[in-house]
Structures are given as C-alpha cells and as structure tokens.
Image (cartoon, rainbow, N blue to C red):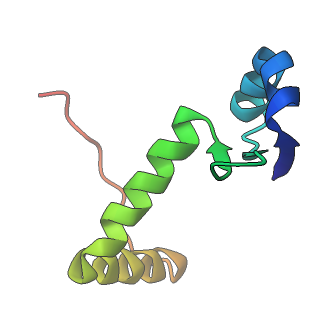
Amino acid sequence: MIAVNYSNVRSNFKAYCDKANNDLETIVITRKQGGNVVMLSEDEYNNLMENLFIRSNKKTYERLIESMAQLKKGKFQARELSDE
C-alpha cells in the first residue's frame, strides 16, 4: 500500500494508474480536507466484491471452505468438461 498526496497523484496520474494495475498496488490518496481516497485496479476491486459476496452468505462460504479442505486432502475427482 502506498500513501501519496493529492497533488503528487494529479501530476503523475498515469504512473499511479499503471502502478495500481501492473503491480496490483493499493494507493491511498491523502487530502488535507474532505477525507482520503483509495485507488485500486478494477481486477482488485472485482476480487474484493466477489469475496464480500461469497462471505455474505454463510452457507455458500461454509461450502467453499469445506470444498477447499477436501481438495487439500486429495478427496476430489477430475472430470472432463463438455463444450455443449
């Protein structure tokens, strides 16, 4: 996570956008008034929203955790997927 002031971001906006996307860096834009702002890539944002959605449903989250545990124990069966 990088904290940088608003003026610096404004004058180097492309570089910070590239850093957020290419390095998956979270950038906190600090401001004297009005509160700080967080910049992150769209991929990181989508991942965050997906995690929040999965965790918001207790049954879905528990099924995911159980599935991961089964996978780690080798209790899975590989299958071919059809294009149909």
Residue at image position (65%, 53%) is: 35
Residue at image position (85%, 17%) is: 11
Q: Nearer the viewer, residue 68 or 32?
A: 32
- Report the side of 32 relative to 76 (left or right): right
Residue 32, horizontal then vertical, whole percent: 78, 48
Is residue 12 something one can see in this rendering? no
Question: Where is 73 relative to 42, above or below?
Answer: below
Question: Where is 1 relative to 51, above or below?
Answer: above
Give the residue furthest to the front: 33
Residue at image position (26%, 83%) is: 58
Q: Nearer the viewer, residue 59 or 21?
A: 21
Residue at image position (85%, 49%) is: 3
Question: Where is 17 relative to 50, above or below?
Answer: above
Number of callouts? 0
For the C terminus, the quadrant is top left
Is residue 6 something one can see in this rendering? yes
Q: Nearer the viewer, residue 48 or 82?
A: 48
Residue 69, horizontal then vertical, whole percent: 46, 83
**Could you say which quadrant of the image residue 76 lies in?**
bottom left
- Report the side of 32 relative to 71 (left or right): right
Residue 49, horizontal then vertical, whole percent: 41, 53
- Report the side of 83 relative to 48 (left or right): left
